[in-house]
Amino acid sequence: MTRKISSLSIVSGFFAVLIAVTGAVKLANQPVMARQVTPVVAMEPDAMLQRYCIGCHNTRLRTAGLALDELDAANVHADAEIWEKVVQKLRAGSMPPPGRFRPDADTYRAVAVSIEDKLDRAWSDDPYPGRIGAVHRLNRTEYRNAIRDLFDLDVDVESLLPGDETADGSFDNFADVLSFSTSHLERYLSVARQVTRQAVGLLPITASVDTFEVPLHIVQDARQDESLPLGSRGGIAIPYHFPVDGNYEVTVRLRRQYQDYLMGMGWAQWLDIRVDGELVERFVVGGSAPGVPAAASYAGDGEPGFAGDPAWETFMQLTGDDGLVVRVPVAAGPHVIGVSFVRQQWEPEGLWQPQQRGRVLTNDQIYMGNAAVAAVDIGGPFSARENARDTPSRRAIYVCEPPSTEAVAERSCASEIIRTVARRAFRRPVTSDEIESLLTFFDEGHRDGQSFDSGVQFALERILVDPDFLLRVYRDPVDAESGQSPYELSDIELASRLSFFLWSSIPDERLLAVAERGELSNPATLEAEATRLLADPRATHALVNDFAAQWLNLRRVREVVVDPRQYPTYDETLLEAFIEEVERFVASTITEDQSVRALLDADYTFVNERLARHYGIEGVYGSRFRRVAIDQSDQRGGLLSAGALLATTSYPDRTSPVLRGKWLVDNIFGWTVPPPPPGVDTTLETTPGTQPDSIRERLARHRENPSCASCHSVIDPLGFALENFDVIGGWRTEDEQGRPVDSTGTTLAGETVAGLSGLRALLLDDPERFPRTVVEKLLAYALGRRLEYYDRPTVRQIVRDAAVTDYRWSSIILGIIRSPAFTSRASAAGIAN
């Protein structure tokens, strides 16, 4: 009998949580200390404002809605939000606007430091570190990781759950953009059922088929994955969870060209299917097409009457890959299905093949080229023997087995299983009443002759749709209702905040146990646990794939569109290499606990043969990525020369100093530049029928508009510094029109920025500049909210403390975890007051 949990039976729980915890937040009761030494300031802030700023930003004109003559430099705390904006403008050197009388760089810096010190001292006397939503939904990544850590089960939820919203400048773990709708609830109910049936190992009612496609433009002449054997080429490695012991079918479909002819059928090739590296079947494909082909027909240029023999046409379009099916017995649990060809040619790997024009595709796709895998279907189970009895998931769930089939024995064991899973899922101890409530679902699933496993599965399904699993909830303590001061997060809340920051997942057993004993709020214990979590591979994976991938726009790389006429060497193999290079590079700086400044000036990167040839790096062969030293630091090294980041800040047919400069301003320099004013033409088009102007000339005309000049004078010089890199990150000395590349620019402060080396020098000249940006991004990610003006003192304190270790990753991460913003919260009553 099939039983389902109704959405009506749990929706009231969500409303109860929402009503109970709504409120505002104010963090911290520990002061952020000001600098120990304040630099000598040649000009005091109020004097600088009078001389350079108040002419426009006064009570009468209120340019940009700002009246600085109303401010009291002796009491910056009274207008802290405005003073923080002033500091940002000073740090960026973006005001006064171009053409106005401006102070020198030393004055900019000294006045900014002076204001910051006053703000920090004032903030330490009256801290207001901000607020976060009291209800914080798990995003898809966190949900997937929580299932992984609860049940030792990796489930791809991308297609099962609604996508997570993001807003400009936000991460997908920000509480205010993670909405919760009835659509979410319905999907969670469906996913909970699928996940728990897999985890428990219940027999499916019917066999199902999962399809895994290989992207069309992946060149399959090299080893595709570390899970595939040496000496292989092409194909795909598929990590797959088999729900029960049984027979499963693996079906391979081969790639076709656009007229639906199979590719590479002119010669015999070996296709292997493996389970966990063990060969289970070898097929011979190609070399057996009956009849005679017509070359024109195969290439796609032939007219009717030019087709090959009917038997050949039928084989090439319909039956040539029909027999690539194997049925194999597989034990329940996670396994890797590998499909690949035996490599028989020894040409360089992963290289782009010259394209032919017209309707003929690449040389890899002609009759005598390499066959390639288009998709793999995994179907089953067929003839399933019984419910799974020994899988990693069952070992994680079944902390006991009932000694008998008596109801008392089974219910006692079920209670222990439920208590163990619910405690981890809810990230807190569970009450006896909660256990009894969940046991009613066990009873419901176990009645009418259903198995013990069925009852356990139904109870686990209920746990996965509980608000305490799906939501991170902050509840004000009763004694905080007066709202007199911020309060410390409970140890249990702190454990969740720590694990979701470093692992994007739930606390493990040790962290939860430390929190339950009330020891996590001890600063030494908190630091020790944070260090332990950071050493776990899950931390590097989360910080790279969840934090850095969003900060550095890596998630947009697969959306890149490149003009094939302008850049014929670009293909999806190169695109995937771009992503892996940056992921491996950022991961290396974290695992080796390097300075975050190494992200800019590292003398190494990670490449395979395809990417090395693209970058002009010699001596790299094969598809395997490896660490290589960079000899020409003026052309390569660090994030700024990475193809992934250069491609996402270009147009399909030309580079864009504006897109690149804006990306640098937002993500590397950490400055704020507003969007273009309404009605301003941003197309930079040239006059029809005339010789196209250079992008530099077009932007110079654009800056003649006063509405554009103030921002473009900041953005453009930075973007021009990367003009030696083309749309896909290749080094060049001429632009798209054949003109010599000019990679120089002059900042508003009068500093010349020349190429990659000059851009690095500008960034590293101020030791705190780039680390400050990293701290801002990482603190926002850790808190799950945007930073506000009242967070700036916290940022500055973390940066100053990390300077002692040259801004190592561990120093910055521990600084965030130690900060009041991370460990404290204010009650809703406190915010109201």
Image: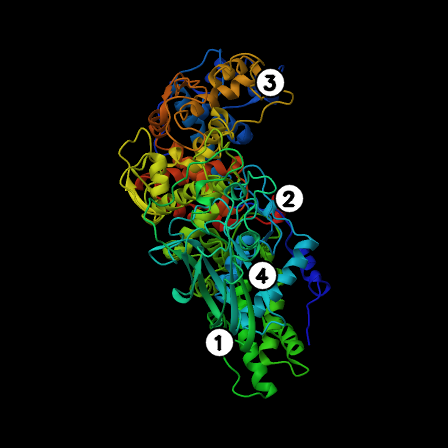
The answer to whether the residues at label 1 and label 3 have Cβ atoms under 8 Å apart is no
Task: List the residue tagged with mark 2.
Answer: 832
Give the quarter of the figure containing the C terminus: top right
Dot 2 or dot 3: first in sequence order is 3
Mark 1 burial class by Cα count in 10 Å: few <14, some 14-19, many 20+: some
Between the C-alphas of marks 4 and 3, the distance is 49 Å
Vertical placement of 147 versus 167: above or below? below
Let me know if residue 139 appears in the view. no
Establish if 5 lies above or below 546. below
Q: Which of marks 4 and 3 is in front?
A: 4
User: Which mark's residue is nearer the viewer, 1 or 3?
Assistant: 1
Q: What residue type is labelled 3?
A: Thr
Q: Nearer the viewer, residue 819 or 827?
A: 819
Question: Label 2 is placed on what type of residue?
Answer: Ala
Q: Is residue 704 left or right of residue 805?
A: right
How would you rate the neighbour count of disc 3 (Cα within 10 Å): few for under 14, some for 14-19, many for 20 or more? some
Residue 3: quarter of image: bottom right
Determine contact: label 2, label 3, CB under 8 Å: no
Tell me whether circle 4 and circle 3 mark residues in contact (CB < 8 Å): no
Q: Residue furthest right?
A: 8
Q: Residue 469 carries which label?
A: 4
| Residue at the disc numbered 1 | 399
**Residue 780, percent across and down?**
50, 42
Front one among 21 and 714: 714
The residue that disc 3 covers is 63
x and y percentages locating residue 47 in the rendered image: 46, 16
Percent position (x, y) of residue 541?
A: 42, 52
Q: Is mark 2 on a helix, strand or loop?
A: helix
